[in-house]
Image (cartoon, grey):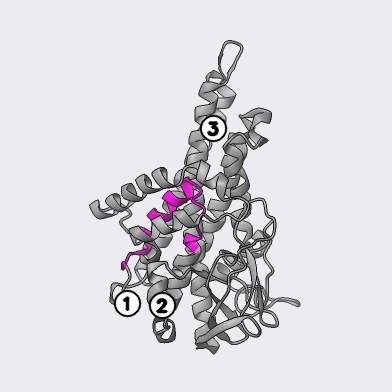
């Protein structure tokens, strides 16, 4: 396993770092609240080819590797870019894996980003799937309805339930009134496998975004401790503050490497191991982002929770993004099942969200 970035990958990373720094300053993030979507930024992002990067070149996409997408999402996460990029990448990669999806009349537009796609992370109940990430603005939703994985085109509601992360979440119907077009992508075991892989793609992309978020939050925390003074010196001069910030570096390096390893494993074609590693990366990145933003905000004192300060933007999203998948404890149990096999005993069975049950999500 070689996780050293190639010259081309460094170019991709640096190019998107410049793009998001220029096009997604925190003023754009603030202006996009509460919906959490900036159409002008998405339009600019379409020009870079990013929405179709995960689709093979033979289908009109960029043919990017999973590691390329991780680098892209890390830079998007650093700036809290208010676009459903992780969601679109996961949905379009899923569409590209099926003949029906790649043959959809709007597929080329989805690759270009003119049609926005989103993954329903929880199976539908009575035709409706709950809290779809990006669902408030998506034209197409890919989700599991009974034994079928379907792609449904319908009108985006353009409104989201209030949530601390200002994420564009929405419940979406996968059949019935309001559905303009419904394409069955796969059925039975194939549908369940594709659904699970779509969740893996989303977890990996979100883990990368959380890694970028945590890295930037640490920088903000360090900068503030150098600026804020107590007893005629910067608070960064105090050992307790220094050690508190230093303790955040190793976990951040750890999730960076774990996310890269998950991407490398995905690129090697080991879907089962990639699913395990993506789940580990997602859970670890969620914890590191939560802890990093908490400490950075703590060193701001009471100012940190005021809307005028930037750190609260990171603090809220570090807590909200992971909860889109549902209860973290359930994901830890799913990971344990993948690592050690399902637990035996009464009341055990498939975990909610694995394709056999419904999790309603836990975004707050």
Q: Position of residue 138 (x, y in %)?
A: 54, 68
Label 3 crowd bin: few (<14), some (14–19), many (20+), radius 10 Å: many
Position of residue 111 measured from the top left corner of the image (x, y, whole percent) = 38, 71
From where the camera sits, is residue 2 visible? yes
Q: Quadrant of the N terminus?
A: bottom left
Q: From the viewer's perspective, tell me whether residue 104 is left or right of residue 125.
A: left
Q: Which residue is mark 2?
A: 107
Q: Helix or strand or loop: what does disc 1 sit on? A: helix
Percent across and percent down for residue 178 are 63, 80
Which of 43 and 266 lies nearest the eye of the viewer? 43
For label 2, the SS is helix
**Quadrant holding the C terminus:** bottom right
- Going from N to C along the chain, the mark reached first, 2 or 3, is 2
Tell me the SS state at disc 3. Answer: helix
Q: Provide the residue designation for mark 1.
A: 59
Which residue is rendered at x = 34% and y = 62% of the image? 49
Nearest to N terminus: mark 2 or mark 1: 1
The mark found on residue 1 in the picture is none
Q: Magenta residues, as a range? A: 62-86
Give whichever of 291, 40 is nearer the camera.
40
Q: Are marks 2 and 1 in contact (CB under 8 Å)?
A: yes
Determine the CA span between mark 1 and mark 3.
Answer: 43 Å
Q: Residue furthest top?
A: 232
Q: Would residue 326 be found to the left or right of residue 314 on screen?
A: right
Mark 1 or 3, closer to the camera: 1
Query: Is residue 98 in the magenta section?
Result: no
Which residue is label 3 attached to? 221
Asked whether residue 70 appears in the rendered view, the answer is no
In the displayed structure image, the side of residue 187 where residue 163 appears, left or right: right
Total numbered badges shown on the rendered structure: 3
Q: Are marks 1 and 3 in contact (CB under 8 Å)?
A: no
């Amino acid at each position: 396993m070689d996780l050293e970035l190639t010259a081309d990958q460094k170019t991709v990373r640096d190019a998107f770092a410049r793009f998001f720094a220029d096009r997604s300053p925190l003023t754009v993030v603030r202006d996009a609240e509460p919906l959490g979507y900036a159409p002008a930024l998405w339009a600019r992002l379409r020009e870079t080819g990013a929405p179709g990067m995960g689709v093979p070149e033979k289908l009109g996409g960029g043919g990017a590797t999973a590691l390329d997408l991780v680098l892209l999402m890390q830079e998007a996460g650093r700036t809290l870019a208010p676009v459903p990029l992780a969601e679109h990448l996961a949905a379009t990669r899923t569409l590209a894996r099926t003949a029906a999806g790649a043959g959809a009349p709007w597929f080329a537009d989805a690759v270009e980003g003119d049609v926005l796609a989103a993954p329903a992370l929880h199976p539908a109940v009575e035709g409706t799937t709950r809290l779809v990430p990006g669902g408030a603005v998506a034209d197409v939703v890919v989700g599991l309805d009974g034994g079928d994985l379907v792609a449904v085109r319908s009108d985006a509601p353009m409104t989201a339930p209030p949530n601390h992360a200002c994420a564009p979440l929405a419940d979406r119907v996968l059949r019935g009134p309001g559905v303009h077009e419904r394409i069955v992508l796969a059925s039975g075991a194939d549908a369940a496998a594709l659904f699970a892989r779509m969740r893996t793609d989303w977890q990996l992309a979100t883990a990368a975004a959380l890694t970028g978020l945590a890295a930037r939050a640490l920088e903000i925390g360090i900068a503030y401790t150098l600026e804020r003074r107590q007893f005629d010196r910067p608070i960064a001069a105090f050992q307790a503050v220094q050690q508190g910030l230093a303790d955040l570096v190793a976990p951040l390096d750890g999730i960076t490497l774990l996310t890269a390893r998950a991407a490398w494993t995905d690129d090697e074609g080991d879907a089962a191991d990639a699913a395990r590693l993506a789940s580990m990366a997602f859970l670890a990145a969620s914890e590191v982002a939560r802890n990093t933003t908490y400490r950075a905000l703590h060193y701001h004192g009471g100012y940190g929770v005021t809307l005028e300060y930037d750190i609260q933007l990171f603090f809220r999203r570090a807590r909200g993004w992971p909860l889109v998948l549902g209860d973290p404890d359930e994901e830890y149990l799913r990971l344990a099942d993948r690592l050690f096999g399902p637990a035996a005993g009464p009341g055990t069975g498939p975990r909610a969200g694995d394709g056999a049950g419904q999790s309603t999500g836990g975004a707050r």
